[in-house]
Image: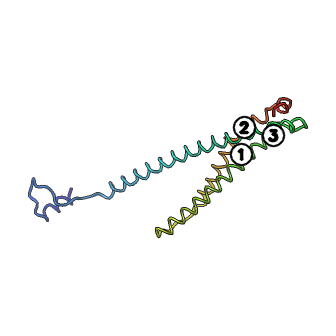
Amino acid sequence: ADIEELLRQRHRIASGQEDDFKVLAPAAALQAQQVAIHTVALLLVAIASVSLLVGGISIMNIMIVSVTERTREIGIRRAIGGRMRDIRLQFLCEALVLCLIGGAAGIGCGVVLSMTVARMAGWITALDLQAIILAVGFSAATGIVFGFYPAYRASKLSPIEALKTE
């Protein structure tokens, strides 16, 4: 208010006339910027969550198809003494490896794309090792969580019923 009054005096603006200047508070601009950044961060989290869910469901479907196609193999393993735990672990490991390969490919593409955009725009970028480790962790967790049901289903197959199917 003091600044506005001083500027009105120096610009010789009469009472009741419109100001020919504008006073902006840096705190308000900073707060608006922080709100915008928070909104974008929430949007990115929502997009990442949906992507993880869709990817996880895809992994689960692939593993269920794998279990269905390998029913006879599972039956043979069970008939010669394979334990339910071993079969469950096999399919969990397959889901985990599948997700880790996908995660590594995603990280690689992200790094290459980030570096390419930065080089073209003349920006300086830094790779955050914690973000990469977090991405690998989420990839592994997705494989374990969404691979558990198909692995459980494979381990519960009866050897006799599995050997009957073709």
Residue occupying image coordinates x 58% and y 62%? 111
* Residue at image mark 3: 87
Amino acid type at image mark 1 = Ala
x%, y% of residue 28? 32, 54
- Mark 3 or mark 1: name the one nearer the start of the chain: 3
Quadrant for residue 104, please give it.
bottom right
Amino acid type at image mark 3 = Ile
* Residue at image mark 2: 150
Is 124 or 21 nearer to us in this picture? 124
- Mark 2 or mark 1: name the one nearer the start of the chain: 1
Q: On the rendered image, what quadrant is the N terminus found in?
A: bottom left
Amino acid type at image mark 2 = Pro
Q: In this view, does 119 lie above or below 43?
A: below
Q: What element carries label 1?
A: helix
Q: Is residue 100 left or right of residue 52?
A: right
Work out how far the residue at label 2 is from the one at label 1, CA to CA, in angstroms.
9 Å
Crowd tier of the residue under label 3, counting other residues whose Cα lies within 10 Å: few below 14, some 14–19, many 20 or above: many
Q: Is mark 2 on a helix, strand or loop?
A: helix
* Residue at image mark 1: 95
x%, y% of residue 116? 53, 66
Is 129 or 79 nearer to us in this picture? 79
